[in-house]
Amino acid sequence: MMKSFDEIRTDAKRGARGPDVEEAPICSTAIVKIASRCNLNCSYCYVYNKGDDGWSRQPAVMSSETVTALVERVRAHCRRHGLDRFHFVFHGGEPLLARRRFVEWFVAAAGAALAPDVEARFSMQTNGVLLSREWARLLKRLGVHVGISMDGLPESHDRWRIDHKGRGSYRGVVAGFEAARREGLDPGILAVIDLAADPAEVYRHFAALRPRIVDFLLPQATWDDPPHRPRAAGYASWLLAIFALWSAEPSPPFRVRLFEQIIRSVLGIADSLDALGRGANAILVIETDGSIETVDVLRVCENGITRTARNVRTDDLDDALTDELPLAYYHSSDRLCATCEACAVREICAGGYLPHRFSRANRFDNPSVYCEDLKALISAIQAWTVGQLPPDLVAATGLCALSATVPVAAPQA
């Protein structure tokens, strides 16, 4: 079964040793920036349009020498920690700007170097515009799982996801999605939420496309650069409108991992995303020059925050995981501010996504800038989940519906 990019991130978090274990952090997923440039110029992009200029000093594409060094570091790391599988996520920029021959060589080289003790797994996150049938056929043959970024309705997508001439990209993305479907890739969709869009229309739009899974993403924001809210209804209300339609379906047309994650957590099933739930974030980012960094979404916080002196040509992955920011990200669900520690939904939310906690005043010692949205969303889905259980089971377990009523203040200097 094909997995989307966020599923791979979920596996990385689920498979990592928890932050309460007194052992060195491990990495089970590398987000590999095989191309540092992009054919689109999305207005909200955290790589190019949120103030960080590190991309401009990176090679346009990754070299074979860097790949060889990376694979050697991965092999040593897996042996050291007894890992039997490792995920490579092709990313960018736009990874399809790399040549098909390069991707084919990368998959073969990594698979051969890690075998037989470690299974190499591969995925790709793409904007889809360049996803031709030739590309799709190759990715299918190589077993590369594909996620495509598509922001819901055409008008929403074309408002934000534009090319370098200001033109919308929706038609090209849909063409890429259909090419992937025709070649049997069964791609997932990542969709950044647009509050201006009618959630019911967005749901029907995706239902008509019938992707295997849709990951609805909160826009990247911090306390210093808060999320845009064009109407009174917040992100929780928008997502709960989707949830009402999705949960009413006898057989939903696609999975929604955010909803599934919350339901599973309510039921006591250990699981997590890197933006929600307990568990270590076992992910590192490898730039095109071989630089080893933590998750690149943290670039929304401030220019240069993710940069380190580590490089796969000179440093082990273990060494990179001891640096301050990668370590903070790895333990982010366990190192919470006082507000989060006192919250009724902390075991499900676990503070939310680390970038969303940032302020220049307190750094990451804050609740999420989406805290009220997360509490309302989790409480509503928790109440729905409890309502689906047999009354005798509810009575036996002592479960009761939550209510999120405590306001969250902005952090103070």
Image (tube, rainbow, N blue to C red):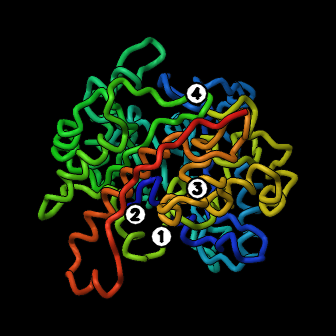
Instruction: Residue 412 in the image: state x and y as whole percent.
Output: 68, 35
Secondary structure found at label 4: loop
Q: Quadrant of residue 91?
A: top right
Q: Earlier in the sequence, mark 3 or mark 1?
A: 1
Whether pointer 3 and pointer 1 mark residues with C-beta atoms closer than 8 Å, the reply is no
Residue 9 in view (yes/no): no
Whether pointer 4 and pointer 1 mark residues with C-beta atoms closer than 8 Å, the reply is no
Quadrant occupied by the C terminus: top right
Q: Earlier in the sequence, mark 2 or mark 1?
A: 2
Q: How far is the residue under mark 2 from the one under mark 1?
A: 7 Å
Residue found 50% across the figure and 22% down from its top = 41
Quadrant occupied by the N terminus: bottom left
**Disc 4 residue crowd, few under 14, some 14–19, many 20+, Cα 10 Å:** some
Q: Earlier in the sequence, mark 4 or mark 2?
A: 4
The residue lying toward the viewer, choosing from 195 and 253, is 195
Whether pointer 3 and pointer 4 mark residues with C-beta atoms closer than 8 Å, the reply is no
Whether pointer 2 and pointer 1 mark residues with C-beta atoms closer than 8 Å, the reply is yes
Q: How far is the residue under mark 3 from the one under mark 1?
A: 19 Å
Q: Amino acid at mark 3?
A: Cys
Q: How far is the residue under mark 4 from the one under mark 2?
A: 27 Å
| Residue furthest to the top | 165
Mark 4 vs mark 2, foreground winner is: 4
Q: Which mark is residue 340?
A: 3
Q: Which mark is residue 271?
A: 1
Q: Which residue is mark 4?
A: 225
